[in-house]
Amino acid sequence: MFKFWNSHVQQDQPHPQEGSSCSWYPPSVVGSTNSSRPATPSSSASNSFNLQRPAEWSHSSSPVSPAEAAGVIALLKDKSVDELRKLLSDKDAYNQFLLSVDQVKIQNNIRDELRNETLQLARNNLDKEPQIMELRNQCRIIRTTELAAAQEKLNELNRQKEETLKFYSPASFMHRLQDAMNVTEEESEIVNRQLLDREIDLGTFVQKYKKLRINYHRRALIHLAAKTSPIG
């Protein structure tokens, strides 16, 4: 990943590409390490690390924010060249350094908290499973017994309601009023026939006939008013 092109470094390191050949770290880590390497007294040493980054690394799916990069640089700026090389070549050293970063610690703490909360919720759900099963059995019993009886009673009440509404509907009222008028008319004819057949005297006839005719005409007026009403 790193190539050491300076001749002075090549004399000290016979195989300058040995550390880069085993580098396995993502471009964000390598970029942060390269940007945060410590300055050396020699200008040739300061130019000893030249990063050759492949084109595909420029399309990182999770770019590091400036604040996070600054935090990582602050941790890397005091490390020596050997320590930086170790981070690039030693997976355990890299993991240990990664776990020491504050941002990583925060994310790990959040992950642990979420995992513990999830486990606690799962335990609570498992503890409530017997209660849930009992409630399901009770609901099943209610559906098969109490609900069926309540549904039957509700149907009966609905039937009674429909009958009541039908009985007091305008059309039903007009029909019953017409029937009452017809009955009163028939009773009047009967009283009149009784008078002709001398079954009753004149005084009784007048009293009964007057009462029947008053009822008849009262109902007739009501029937006529209902018939001409907008409700009818």
Image (spheres, rainbow, N blue to C red):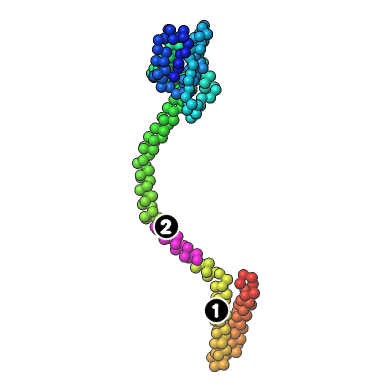
Is residue 75 in sight in this rendering? no
Q: Position of residue 216 (x, y in %)?
A: 60, 80
Where disc 1 sits, the SS reads helix
Whether residue 172 is visible: yes
Category of crowding for the residue at label 1, using alpha-carbon neighbours closer than 10 angstroms: few (below 14), some (14–19), many (at least 20): few
- 19 in relation to 180, above or below: above
Q: What is the tally of numbered marks visible in this picture?
A: 2
Q: Residue furthest bottom?
A: 197
152 shown above or below 27: below
Q: Is residue 16 left or right of residue 214?
A: left
Q: For the residue labelled by badge 2, is the local secondary structure a helix, a strand or a loop?
A: helix
Q: Earlier in the sequence, mark 1 or mark 2?
A: 2
Q: Which residue is mark 1?
A: 179
Residues 88 and 220: in front is 88
Q: Classify residue 59 as left or right of residue 132.
A: right
Q: Is residue 118 magenta?
A: no
Residue 153 shown in magenta: yes
Q: Which mark is residue 43?
A: none
Q: Nearer the viewer, residue 47 or 69?
A: 47
Q: Residues within 10 Å of mark 2 (few under 14, many from 20)?
A: few
Give amino acid for label 1: Asp
- Quadrant of the image containing the N terminus: top left
Q: Is residue 84 left or right of residue 227?
A: left
Label 1 – label 2 distance at C-alpha: 38 Å
- Asked if 79 appears above or below 232 in the picture, the reply is above
Q: Position of residue 196 (x, y in %)?
A: 57, 93
Which residues are the magenta region?
148-162
Residue at coordinates 51% horizontally, 7% vertically from top-left? 42
Residue under pointer 2: 150
Give the x, y percent position of residue 135. Answer: 38, 46
